[in-house]
Structures are given as structure tokens and as C-alpha cells.
Image (cartoon, helix red, strand yellow):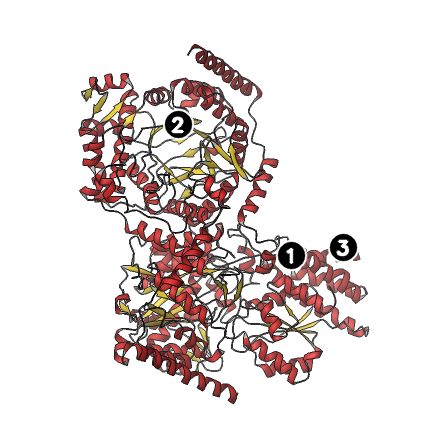
């Protein structure tokens, strides 16, 4: 089944005016010049010093020359295609289309069997990957849940290992933050692609690494950026500041900080691997000022952040990844509907290339298969709306209007019979009359979604991997697991 | 040479597909070849419409298709009916007089129910929209229907349903006909309050209700 | 707490979802249809006036056909800008195309009972309650008759519905149930009493009105008389088309938009012929149909949503004020579906623009009103209000100094800048903010619970701008006079 995405023919909606966009850019360069970033990656400190940047080895801080920043980020300009095991699922990124992934990597999953959340396992991850594979609105995958039953040092590899045989879509590996796991995942991807060259041409995986707000780059992620970049794997640079906690208590200030962090990551990436495929990822969010809880998907500020990142990325000429479909709700209720609908509809007119992700509750803390079905329904409406409708003579239907005339009806017209199946139909929304709905115990849409999850998990079988590939992937997994065990004992 | 079985099949398929030519051809063939008209009606047409109704309930068939099939059914019926009359076969009264009440021009719901009733073998006499009460009384006196079905969409026209029921009483007709009411603002509560015999919130349920009222359910 | 000043939502984006060529195609098709198909009407006065103005009229069929050039000339007469007044002039709306205002929905016959949580028929007191809650919500700028006064006799029910609102709100009222000359006259009397004189009602029309064509292409007699009388007294009149795709309009989005547009143009032409230069606005409530059951599906899926957005582009093309249909969930309760449908609709309104976003607070495709729904929908509008307004990007907001002060690896929690601004952000009145554990222990409440508490709080605390006692008496007297006249007429029948 081909994947779906947002395709908006108009100019993307921009939440910032051109002046505001320019201000964010300029102030980010100021921040990088005057404040800079700190990093525990010594190699980066050394290389940046060699490149003439102001490096304080004592404080492990780099201050960047604005011209150098502009020069380095220009090396990463350009769009590319994300490969998939099934080439039909390749995603051509062009700054005009938006594709949705599953949410990841949540430590808990909502289990309908117990009506409650619980910790997730590798088996859950396999099932959720298979579910994602069956849903056309899910165009690529994150690792929906953590493989909590696997040892930490190779957990990211397990999380990817669980996915290869359960989907033919592009996998965005977003849990590997060290060179050990990055190398192992690269080995697996090479086996599935057939060769290092084939993987470079059609990268079956992508990855991203996060700055630690404010303005810090940890050692492992920088090594992973370099290692994956050298293999031609697209690696995104992520900033995820929390307004008023790890960024200023203002939308503008948070965007300045996020932009500075992302640009710093790109400069490091493009200096280590010039021309490496990159993407811009702003996951700025808000918190509850009272409790301090994370509020992603909450309100107007988050909705602004989710499309402001795309706007900045278009300025720099690189693909972007943004948040979508998050909700603070703990169940598929009015709040979940409202928050996810806002987030999806906004992307209809302002799509980032990659949008993550579907299927969560409680501020992206609990994965929910039920909510993923509902998120796909929401996304489907927004995607269909964004696609627009034909206004040709057949669709304008003047002759039909004339034929029916004043006071008539169109129900039995041949035009109606011909077109009545052209329209969108809901899979989960209630269509009962009040009386029938009342008699049925006033069911909510999540009930229909729950049945859909069960149906898909019972029926959907992703295209299998060749047996030798599966064996090779298992072998790599075992080898890395053994190495990790050994390292653990050494510690 | 076609067989009776093939033609029943064609009639069934024709009515389910809303294919007028095929349905009429089959009906004509069956009549011309001396098949008992009662059988054509029950084994052919009514059965086909029952199947259509079942498909509709499952969500496979859409309302515009039901409307078209109902029109085809009516045309087939026009072929079979004279044959029935020749046989002196008195058709069980399942005539429904449908109308949208005085002051209300919104007759879509009434049209939908009318179409659905036809698919279930009811004969429907449609008085139209914005129908004055005296016209309803005259129709009931003249046509002697089993059921009067009234729709109203506006909150300001719904009370007209009560006016009609009162007029039926006044003219001594209330015991001779069952009254069904419907429309967006109408509920069972309202139906009970004005002394209607039946109310249904949707077209298919209206058909079920009509069957119950004439003891056919 | 006093009347909440209405939010003026910025028309910031004004996205046209259809291209200029598509707009022109719809316009041309609409003119063709009005010329070739025309409209029927039971209003003899209208037929005569249109014939006098050189339009082709078939008196036998009671049908008129409109000359394209005449339609364009009449539409061009409509003023773009006008004022929608209010009992409290501070709540008046300057309609210029720069801002939008949100109205409550109308006019369901049923309401969700606050105590039983079940639906029941509504009454005049319910109308008063809804008006009071809407008066307290800054997200609402315009009030419709949200529920029927089913406990009043039909011939004066529209007057009762409005009579119930005057003491409960000082915001603009869009009267949408009065569709005959009798109620129109009564309402003008009430409006004149409140405004002080006929002249001040004309300057400060405390209510507006709209009338609907019956799709396809029929103008009933009474609405035409009513809108003529209203317009003669300076009341702004909306022309409303509410076709359903595949039932009362073609089974295509383009056909749906075209039919609605043609009908609205016919109404504009009627109005501008009868009362030249009177303020009119464009209202398209084009909706989907459930193709299986035939149920109406406003806000259900992408087609209805798109058609409503396209209508905003058409109104912009004619340079007239417009309603952008907003909300109207098909859901029977304030659940996930209601959240999705109403949020989609609300955001689409902010994206495409329109002067009036109507309307919020109903369930079940505008057939049941819910006070909890009203509060929840107002939350949706609050998010849209802040989102569309955007944020400051001055030096204080850009906060480079604060970022420098904190430096890499620090945090912003105790910064002066944070303490100064931490209350600037959106805070929900109804969403659940508990931890999973607390929420579970509390019986897993959903936002309806918080919304109900908010409704009860407003009903007990809110005090609308008081209506002067003598004015209240005068309104009661007008109401009684019309009620007596209506009863007399009824007896005559």
C-alpha cells in the first residue's frame, strides 16, 4: 500500500513575518558568536580551533564566527530521498510535502487488555511497527516504544532489529546516540540494502541527534553524527528546548535558542563531514508553569513552534522535521481530538518534510495503538483537504443543476450515482442515531479504533525479508549484544 | 431461450443495480410468460428489495442508489399491478401517504423515507411539501392509507404535526389510520405527547416502524 | 464579573483554497445558472419588482431568471464595511474584513440538561441561560438564538427567543429565527426601544438577521418580506444557502460551492433590488451527506470543510462581508470526534478568514445545544485567538541577554525574565493537567467535567450589563402586545 502525505499546492503558511524570521536568524548568530556552545567532544573542539573558531579548551566552549556559520550550513543545503525497503515507499523530500511517522521512543504503552499503561518490550515494538506498516498515513517509522526488556547498551540496536522484518517503510533511527550503536545499526542497514554503496544511494535509515538545551553538545551524539554522515545516512540536528525551563520564557527567545542550537549542530556536522545530508529539527515545547510538566501539543505556543521550525528550515534550504499529533490527554477524549486536529490541520498548510509522530498520550509519554488509528483518521482528513478538489466542468455540474431545477433534489441523478463514492468516509466516527447510540451505551470512537487495531494485528503481514538477510541481522545483533555484555563486565 | 430462473436473477440484479432497462425487461418477460404476478411481486421484486435493504444496512449501498432502485421498483410495479387486478387479487393495504407539513419546504427527509419504504414493498403516495391540513384529510378519506407519515424540519413547523392529528380526530379518521412522525427536532417524547403511533430517528428505522404498525414486522 | 469584551480575531492569513481561475469558474457557472435555471418564489411582490427591473419573470411558474450583468451590478452595490451594534456600544463590531468574531450556534430544539446529561426539549429560560454564559465568554462576540423557546407559541417564538436574550447579554445579537414580517416588525420595535430611536437603531443596529434560500433555488415568500423590512430599518442582512452535497446540491465539491454561490447571489440581487445599498453578508453552510444513511454531516470530513473554505474565497472575490461556517460537530457528545471536527473547522476559519465565525456550542449536527460544549468550543477558539495573534519579537522577547546570562548547560527557571513572563502563556480552563496517577485516582475525568464546573460557575457568578428597568418593562409590553395579536390571529384561523 502506497504511503500518503501532505501535499499543499499553495505557499506554505509562515507563522513568522519575514522581519521576524530575519531577527531569529540574526540573534542566533549573535548567540553563537557571543555565547557559543559547550561540548564534551574533544575532537570537535580541536577541529573548530583549526578552522579558526574561538575555542576555550578549559571551558570546552566554542564561539562561532557568523560568516563561518553561514559558510558551513551552506554545505548542507539541498533535499534528498529517504529510501525504504520497498522502493514504492521511498519518500522524496522537496520542502513541499510532509510525511508522518509513528511517535517514539516511549517507555510505556497503553494496553487495552488491562485498560492501563505498562512498560513496553521488544515484542510491543515489533507489533507497533507492524501496525504502522499497515497504515498508509504513517509514511516512515520511529521506534514507537522502548525495548525495556533488553540491556541498555544495545537497546537502540534491538529497537531497530525489531523493525526490519516488520515494515518495508523508511526507518528513522532516533534512539542511537553513541558510535557503538550507530555502527551496529549501520551494519544492519548495509545488509538490508545489499551494499554500502546501495545504502548511500537510497538510505533505508536516517537518524538525528539532539543538543542539550541550552547550548550543549554531548560527546556520543557528535561521534554518531560523524559516523553516520560518512556513510551517507541523513542525520538531523535537533533542539528541544522547554520554554521557561531550558529556554527563555518567550516564544521568540525560545526560537532564537533553538535555531542557534540547530545551526551549531549543522556547523559541527558539515565541518566533520562536508556535504552530509542533514535536516533541521525544532522540537521546542512548553511546560505547565504550575507543575513543571511537559506540555507538548498543548496550545497556541506549541502550534507556533511546530511550523516555525519548518519556516526556518526553508530559509536554510534543508529538509525539516517537526512535531505533530502530540496530546496531553491520557485517553482518546475531546482533548486528544482537539490537540491532534489542530496540529494536523496546521501541517496541511505548512508541512515540514518529516512530521513526528502519531500514537501517543500524556505528552508523548505513553504509546497508544488506539490513538495511532485515530491520529491516522485525523491526518487523513487534513491530507485530503490539503489536496484540494477539481473544479472542471464535470465537477461544476451546471447541467445537473439545470436538470434538477428549483425545488428538486439530486439523490437519483446519474451524476450523483457516478460520484457518490468519491468522498471521504470515516472509519471510526459514530454514525448512529441518538436512540441507537444511547442504547449501545454511548460508545466513543476509541472503541472502533480498538477493533481496528485488533483487526490489523491479526491480518497484516509485512513483506518478509529474505531468510539469509534475517539470519545475518540476527548474527549482527548477537555479536553486538555479546560485545556489550563483555564491556559491561569490564566496567 | 431465457429461463424463468435467469429472469428472476436479472430482475434481482437489475433492481439491486438500479438498472431500469434490465429490470423492466425481466418483469415484462415474466409477465408475458405467464408467471403468477403474486409470485413476481413476492419472489422477484420484494425479495430483491429486501436484499438491497440488507446491503444498505451493511453500508455497502448508498442512499442515492436506494432512491434510483425505488424508482425502478415503481416502474416494475406498474407492469405487474394490472395483472394482479386482472386476477382479482386484492393487494394487502400497505399504502403510506407521505407529506411535509404546512409551512415547511424541507422535504429531503420525507423523500428518503419514501424511497426506503418503496424498497420494502410499501406503496407510497407523496403529497409533497408545505401540505395544508385539509389536503391531508382529503387524501386519507379518499385513498384510505394504512399509514400517514409526516415530516417537519423546522422547530416552528413541528407543531403542525399535532394540528394534523387533531384534524384527523375531528374528522373521525384517527382510528382508521396509523400516524408516523419524523424530522430533525422530533423525538419519541414529542410523538408520545401528540399521540402519534410511531416515530423513528432514521429512514431504515422508519421502515421497521411502518412494518410494525401494519403488523408485517 | 462583567460582560467579557469580545475577542476580535485577526484575519491574518486569508488563504484562498481555490485558485483565481477556479473562483472565476464558480462565478461564471453561477451566473449561467441564475440566467438559465433561475429561482422560484412564492413572493408575488418580488416577482413584480424584478419584472419592473427588467428581469425575465414567469408569473405562471412563479419563477425568475436573472441577467448576469444585473446580478453583477447589484452585488457591486453591497457596502464592504458596516457596523454591527450592541446594547453596550463597547461590544459593537466594526466590520471591515480585518477582524472576525465568533457567534454561538443556533437554533437547536433540544439541549443537554446540565443535571441529567441527557437531551431534552429546550425552553425560553434555557435561551436566557445560554445567553448569560456566552456573555461571560470573551471568545464570543455575537449571539444567535441557541435554542428554541419551545414553551412559547410558534407565531411569536422568534420574538420570545430574542426577548430572553436582551437582559442576559449586551453583545451583538444575530437574529436567525425570525423569518416572517410579523416577527421582524416586533423585533424592530424592541430594537428601537433599546437603541432609543429608529435613527439610532440604524446607526447602532443591536441585532442583525439572515434569511435562507431553500436549496435548490427557492425563495419562500415570508423570508423575503422579513428581510426587506429589516433592511429598511438598517438591519444588516445575511443571505444564507445551506445545500447538502448529493441531496440538494450536486455530488461534487465544485458543484456544491457553485450552487451555494448562485443562491447567495440571487439573494444579494433580491436585497439590492428591494433596498439598494443595504449591508448584506455572504453565508454558505454547505455540508456533506452521509451517503449511506443520508444524515447531514456538517464538519464531518474534508469535503464540507473545503467547500466552506472555498466560500470565503468567493466572498472575498465579491468584496463582501461573510460568515465562515465554524464548528457544528456531528458527534452526539463532547468526545474525540467533537474535538477533532470543531478544531479542524476553527483552524480552517482562522486560515481562510471571514467576518463572522458561526457558531459554537452545539452537538449532533446543530440539533442539540450544550453549555458544556459552548465552554469547550470557547477553549478551542481561545487557542486559535492566541495562535493567530502571533507573538512579540522585540528585544525583550528575543531574550538574547537572558540566554547569555544563563549560558550553556544552565536553566531559565529562576531568571527575572522568566518570572516576568511566565504568565504570558496559554493556560487551559478545561484540559486535564493531573499526573497519570492522580488522574487515575480521580476516576479518569475527561474535559467535560471541568467544562460543567465552568458553566455552573458562570451561571452563578456572572452579571451581564443590566437592562434599565423601564426598558425591561417596555420590552415586556411589546412582547405581550405581539403575543396577544398572535393569539388573536390563531383564533381567527
Question: What residue do we see at 51% from left, 46% from top?
Answer: C443
Quarter location, residue B53: bottom right
Seen from the viewer's position, the closer of residues A491 and A464 is: A491
Viewer can see residue B191? yes
Report how far apart the C-alphas of labels 3 and 2 lie in the structure.
Answer: 64 Å
Chain under disc 2: A
Report how far apart the C-alphas of labels 1 and 2 lie in the structure.
Answer: 53 Å
Give the side of residue A232 with respect to residue C402, left or right. Answer: right
Seen from the viewer's position, the closer of residues A98 and A131 is: A131
Q: Where is residue C145 drawn, in percent x and y? A: 42, 69
Callouts 1 and 2 close, C-beta under 8 Å: no
Q: Where is residue C295 drawn, in percent x and y? A: 54, 60
Query: Circle 2 sits on which residue?
Result: A207
* Front: mark 1 or 2: 2
Q: Secondary structure beneath disc 2?
A: strand
Chain under disc 1: B
Q: Which mark is residue A34?
A: none
Quarter location, residue C457: bottom left
Seen from the viewer's position, the closer of residues A24 and C398 is: C398
Query: Circle 3 sits on which residue?
Result: B6
On screen, residue A449 above or below A62 = below
Quarter location, residue B194: bottom right
Quadrant position of the N terminus of chain C in the picture: bottom left
Query: Circle 1 sits on which residue?
Result: B17
On screen, residue A271 above or below C50 = above
Give the side of residue A455 with respect to residue A44, left or right. Answer: right
Q: Secondary structure beneath disc 3?
A: helix
Callouts 3 and 2 close, C-beta under 8 Å: no
Viewer can see residue C367? no
Amino acid at each position: 500500500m502506497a504511503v500518503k502525505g501532505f501535499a499543499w499546492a499553495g505557499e506554505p503558511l509562515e507563522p513568522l513575518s519575514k522581519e521576524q524570521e530575519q531577527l531569529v536568524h540574526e540573534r542566533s548568530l549573535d548567540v553563537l558568536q557571543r555565547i557559543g556552545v559547550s561540548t564534551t567532544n574533544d575532537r570537535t573542539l580541536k577541529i573548530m580551533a583549526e578552522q579558526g573558531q574561538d575555542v576555550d579548551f578549559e571551558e570546552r566552549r566554542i564561539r562561532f564566527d557568523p560568516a563561518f556559520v553561514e559558510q558551513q550550513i551552506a554545505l548542507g543545503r539541498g533535499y534528498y530521498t529517504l529510501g525504504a525497503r520497498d522502493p514504492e515507499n521511498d519518500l522524496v523530500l522537496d520542502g513541499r510535502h510532509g510525511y508522518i511517522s509513528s511517535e517514539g521512543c516511549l517507555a510505556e504503552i497503553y494496553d487495552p487488555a488491562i485498560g492501563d499503561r505498562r512498560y513496553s518490550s521488544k515484542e510491543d515494538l515489533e507489533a507497533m511497527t507492524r501496525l504502522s506498516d499497515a497504515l498508509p498515513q504513517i509514511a516512515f517509522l520511529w521506534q514507537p516504544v522502548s525495548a525495556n526488556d533488553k540491556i541498555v547498551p544495545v537497546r537502540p540496536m534491538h529497537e531497530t532489529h525489531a523493525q526490519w522484518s516488520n515494515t518495508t517503510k523508511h526507518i528513522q533511527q532516533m534512539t542511537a546516540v553513541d558510535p557503538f550503536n550507530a555502527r551496529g545499526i549501520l551494519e544492519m542497514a548495509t545488509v538490508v540494502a545489499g551494499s554500502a554503496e546501495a545504502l548511500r544511494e537510497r538510505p533505508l535509515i536516517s537518524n538525528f541527534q539532539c543538543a542539550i538545551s541550552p547550548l550543549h553538545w554531548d560527546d556520543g551524539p557528535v561521534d554518531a553524527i560523524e559516523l553516520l554522515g560518512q556513510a551517507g545516512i541523513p542525520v538531523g540536528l535537533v533542539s528541544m528546548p522547554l520554554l521557561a525551563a531550558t529556554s527563555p520564557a518567550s516564544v521568540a527567545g525560545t526560537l532564537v535558542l533553538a535555531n542557534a542550537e540547530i545551526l551549531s549542530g549543522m556547523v559541527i556536522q558539515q565541518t566533520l563531514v562536508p556535504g552530509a545530508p542533514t535536516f533541521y529539527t525544532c522540537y521546542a515545547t512548553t511546560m505547565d508553569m504550575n507543575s513543571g510538566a511537559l506540555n507538548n501539543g498543548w496550545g497556541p505556543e506549541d502550534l507556533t513552534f511546530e511550523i516555525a521550525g519548518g519556516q526556518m528550515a526553508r530559509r536554510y534550504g534543508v529538509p525539516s522535521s517537526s512535531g505533530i499529533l502530540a496530546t496531553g490527554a491520557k485517553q482518546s477524549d475531546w482533548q486528544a481530538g482537539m490537540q491532534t486536529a489542530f496540529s494536523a490541520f496546521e501541517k496541511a498548510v505548512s508541512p515540514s518534510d518529516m512530521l513526528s509522530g502519531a500514537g501517543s498520550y500524556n505528552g508523548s509519554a505513553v504509546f497508544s495503538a488506539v490513538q495511532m488509528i485515530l491520529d491516522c483518521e485525523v491526518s487523513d482528513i487534513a491530507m485530503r483537504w490539503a489536496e484540494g478538489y477539481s473544479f472542471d466542468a464535470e465537477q461544476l455540474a451546471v447541467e445537473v443543476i439545470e436538470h434538477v431545477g428549483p425545488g428538486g433534489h439530486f439523490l437519483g441523478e446519474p451524476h450523483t450515482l457516478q460520484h457518490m463514492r468519491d468522498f471521504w468516509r470515516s472509519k471510526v466516527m459514530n454514525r448512529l442515531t441518538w436512540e441507537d447510540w444511547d442504547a449501545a451505551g454511548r460508545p466513543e470512537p476509541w472503541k472502533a479504533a480498538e477493533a481496528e487495531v485488533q483487526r490489523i494485528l491479526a491480518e497484516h503481514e509485512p513483506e518478509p525479508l529474505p531468510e539469509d538477510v534475517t539470519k545475518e541481522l540476527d548474527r549482527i545483533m548477537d555479536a553486538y549484544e555479546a560485545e556489550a555484555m563483555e564491556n559491561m563486565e569490564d566496567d | 431461450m431465457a429461463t424463468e430462473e435467469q429472469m428472476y436473477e436479472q430482475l434481482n440484479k437489475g433492481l439491486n443495480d438500479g438498472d431500469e432497462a434490465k429490470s423492466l425487461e425481466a418483469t415484462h418477460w415474466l409477465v408475458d410468460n405467464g408467471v403468477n404476478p403474486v409470485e413476481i411481486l413476492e419472489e422477484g421484486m420484494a425479495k430483491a428489495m429486501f436484499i438491497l435493504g440488507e446491503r444498505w444496512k451493511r453500508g455497502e449501498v448508498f442512499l442515492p442508489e436506494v432512491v434510483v432502485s425505488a424508482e425502478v421498483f415503481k416502474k416494475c410495479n406498474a407492469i405487474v399491478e394490472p395483472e394482479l387486478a386482472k386476477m382479482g387479487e386484492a393487494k394487502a393495504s400497505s399504502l403510506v401517504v407521505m407529506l411535509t407539513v404546512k409551512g415547511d419546504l424541507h422535504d429531503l427527509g420525507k423523500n428518503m423515507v419514501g424511497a426506503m419504504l418503496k424498497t420494502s414493498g410499501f406503496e407510497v403516495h407523496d403529497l409533497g411539501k408545505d401540505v395544508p391540513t385539509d389536503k391531508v384529510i382529503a387524501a386519507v378519506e379518499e385513498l384510505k392509507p394504512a399509514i400517514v407519515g409526516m415530516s417537519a424540519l423546522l422547530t416552528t413547523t413541528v407543531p403542525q404535526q399535532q394540528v394534523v392529528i387533531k384534524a384527523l380526530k375531528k374528522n373521525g379518521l384517527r382510528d382508521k389510520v396509523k400516524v408516523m412522525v419524523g424530522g430533525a427536532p422530533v423525538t419519541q417524547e414529542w410523538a408520545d405527547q401528540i399521540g402519534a403511533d410511531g416515530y423513528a430517528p432514521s429512514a431504515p428505522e422508519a421502515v421497521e416502524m411502518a412494518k410494525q404498525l401494519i403488523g408485517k414486522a | 464579573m462583567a460582560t467579557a469584551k469580545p475577542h476580535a480575531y485577526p484575519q491574518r492569513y486569508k488563504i484562498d483554497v481555490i485558485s483565481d481561475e477556479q473562483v472565476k469558474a464558480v462565478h461564471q457557472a453561477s451566473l449561467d445558472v441564475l440566467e438559465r435555471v433561475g429561482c422560484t418564489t412564492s413572493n408575488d411582490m418580488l416577482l413584480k419588482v424584478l419584472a419592473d427591473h427588467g428581469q425575465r419573470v414567469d408569473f405562471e411558474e412563479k419563477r425568475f431568471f436573472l441577467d448576469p450583468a444585473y446580478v453583477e451590478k447589484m452585488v457591486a452595490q453591497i457596502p464592504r464595511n458596516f457596523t454591527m451594534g450592541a446594547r453596550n456600544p463597547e461590544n459593537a463590531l466594526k466590520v471591515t474584513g480585518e477582524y472576525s468574531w465568533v457567534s454561538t450556534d443556533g437554533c437547536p430544539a433540544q439541549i443537554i440538561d446540565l443535571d441529567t446529561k441527557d437531551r431534552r426539549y429546550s425552553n425560553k429560560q434555557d435561551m436566557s441561560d445560554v445567553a448569560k454564559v456566552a456573555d461571560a465568554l470573551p471568545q464570543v462576540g455575537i449571539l444567535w438564538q441557541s435554542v428554541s423557546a419551545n414553551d412559547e407559541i410558534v407565531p411569536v417564538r422568534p420574538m420570545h427567543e430574542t426577548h430572553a436574550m436582551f437582559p442576559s447579554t449586551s453583545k451583538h445579537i444575530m437574529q436567525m429565527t425570525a423569518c416572517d414580517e410579523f416577527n421582524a416588525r416586533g423585533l424592530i420595535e424592541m430594537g428601537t426601544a433599546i437603541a432609543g430611536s429608529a435613527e439610532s437603531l440604524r446607526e447602532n443596529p443591536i441585532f442583525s438577521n439572515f434569511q435562507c434560500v431553500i436549496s435548490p433555488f427557492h425563495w419562500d415568500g415570508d423570508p423575503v418580506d422579513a428581510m426587506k423590512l429589516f433592511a429598511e430599518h438598517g438591519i444588516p442582512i445575511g443571505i444564507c444557502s445551506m445545500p447538502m452535497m448529493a441531496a440538494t446540491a450536486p455530488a461534487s465539491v465544485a458543484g456544491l460551492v457553485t450552487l451555494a454561490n448562485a443562491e447567495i447571489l440571487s439573494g444579494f440581487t433580491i436585497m439590492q433590488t428591494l433596498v439598494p445599498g443595504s449591508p448584506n453578508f455572504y453565508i454558505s453552510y454547505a455540508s456533506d451527506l452521509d451517503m449511506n444513511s443520508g444524515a447531514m454531516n456538517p464538519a464531518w470530513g474534508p469535503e464540507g470543510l473545503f467547500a466552506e473554505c472555498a466560500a470565503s474565497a468567493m466572498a472575498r472575490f465579491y468584496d463582501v462581508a461573510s460568515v465562515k461556517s465554524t464548528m457544528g460537530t456531528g458527534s452526539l457528545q463532547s468526545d474525540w470526534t467533537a474535538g477533532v471536527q470543531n478544531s479542524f473547522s476553527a483552524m480552517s476559519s482562522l486560515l481562510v478568514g471571514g467576518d463572522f465565525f458561526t457558531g459554537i456550542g452545539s452537538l449532533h449536527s446543530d440539533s442539540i445545544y450544550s453549555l458544556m460544549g459552548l465552554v469547550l468550543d470557547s477553549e478551542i477558539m481561545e487557542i486559535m485567538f492566541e495562535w493567530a495573534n502571533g507573538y512579540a519579537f522585540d528585544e525583550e522577547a528575543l531574550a538574547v541577554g537572558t540566554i547569555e546570562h544563563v549560558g550553556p548547560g544552565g536553566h531559565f527557571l529562576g531568571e527575572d525574565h522568566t518570572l516576568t513572563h511566565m504568565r504570558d502563556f496559554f493556560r487551559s480552563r478545561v484540559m486535564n493537567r493531573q499526573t497519570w496517577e492522580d488522574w487515575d485516582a480521580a476516576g479518569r475525568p475527561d474535559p467535560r467535567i471541568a467544562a460543567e464546573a465552568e458553566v455552573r460557575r458562570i451561571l452563578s457568578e456572572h452579571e451581564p450589563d443590566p437592562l434599565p428597568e423601564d426598558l425591561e418593562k417596555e420590552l415586556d409590553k411589546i412582547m405581550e402586545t405581539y403575543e396577544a395579536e398572535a393569539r388573536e390571529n390563531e383564533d381567527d384561523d
